[in-house]
Each structure stands twice: as structure tokens, then as C-alpha cells.
Amino acid sequence: MCFAVAIAPAGTTGQQRDHNATNTKDQQTKEQPAKDQQTKDPDPRPKTTLRAQPVIAMSPARVVLTAELNGGANDFEEYYCPTVEWDWGDDTRSEATSDCEPYRAGKSEIKRRFTVEHVYKRPGSYRISFRMKRRDKTVGAATTNVQIRPGLRDIGE
């Protein structure tokens, strides 16, 4: 047999001992949810960002765009082997798909960086969109803006 014995400091009454035991139980109960919250899985979905370099240029301008997936799980299934679509904001789009091995949880890794170049021939403000798709559903997206100012060949027009 096993017995649990509570030892109270000298000079404590039975009521004080019971009160102390109750407070300790309450503290344990109150602390438990905090521990549970800490052990919950963080959001497995990586955050999508899009950067343009340069953000302001003279036409014609070559702009390098980089979409990055930060944080989240390396094997996030929705982001594994997506179709990538770029909307350049100048009435043109491009799309790319990859031929990938079948997804395997814990083994397959998502691609975290997508880099492309685009040439803007006319001045203007352009909103660029990056989308990752699975079938026809957009699963991740980001946007950024670039400003293309008139270049030497635009002055005479």
C-alpha cells in the first residue's frame, strides 16, 4: 500500500492545512491550461511574402521578384508542388508547374523561394500578384507594387 502524507509547517491548524492543500490544487489546475496552450502546434501554414527589386525604376525596367515562404511546416501539404501564377499588373500573366514526386508526410519538402524577372516597357504603377494553386484553388498569395517612371525613349511620346 502507498500512502500520501501532507506535512504542514509547525503550528498550523488542520483548517490551514486543508486550505493550503486546496490552494495548491487550484494552482495546479490554473497552471494546466497554460501548459496545454504552450504545447499546441504552431500554425503549420508558412507565411507568404513578395519583394520586388527595384521598387522604383525607369522604363524599360527589369524587375526581379522574390516570393518566400517563411515559418510553418517544411512538409505543409497544401504548399507542396503548387502551380505558381504571376500576375504582372500590366495585363500579362505567367504560370509554372513542376513535376513532383507524390507527397509523403514528414518526407516531402515544400519549395520556399520563387524568383523571376519581368520587364516593364511602359511607365506606370503596377500591382504584382503571386499565387500558389492546387488544382484551381488558391492556397497562398502575396502582392507588392512597383513604380515605373518614364525613361528617355518615353519623353518624345
Image: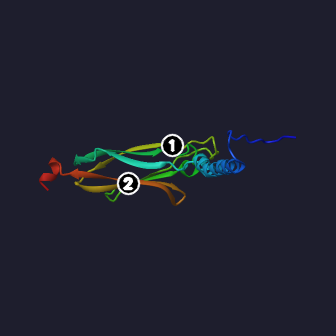
Alpha-carbon neighbours of circle 2 within 10 Å: few (<14), some, or many (≥20)?
Answer: some
Image coordinates for residue 29, horizontal then vertical, percent = 65, 51
- Distance of mark 2 from mark 1, alpha carbons? 18 Å
Q: Pick the quarter of the image with the N terminus.
A: top right
Badge 1 crowding class, 10 Å Cα cut-off, few under 14, some 14 to 19, many 20 or more, is: some
Q: Looking at the image, can residue 60 be seen? A: no
Q: Is residue 38 left or right of residue 14?
A: left
Q: Picture quarter containing residue 157?
A: bottom left
Give the label on residue 111, or none.
1
x then y, percent, for residue 21 = 69, 48
**Image position of 62 with respect to 129: above or below:** above
Looking at the rendered structure, which numbered label has been put on residue 145? none
* Residue wearing tag 2: 143
**Kind of residue at disc 2:** Thr
Work out whether residue 111 can be spotted: yes
Q: Tell me residue 30's x, y (percent).
A: 61, 52
> Which is nearer the eye, 72 or 86?
72
**Contact? badges 2 and 1 (CB < 8 Å):** no
Disc with the residue nearer the chain's start (2 vs 1): 1
SS label for mark 1: loop
- The residue furthest left is 156
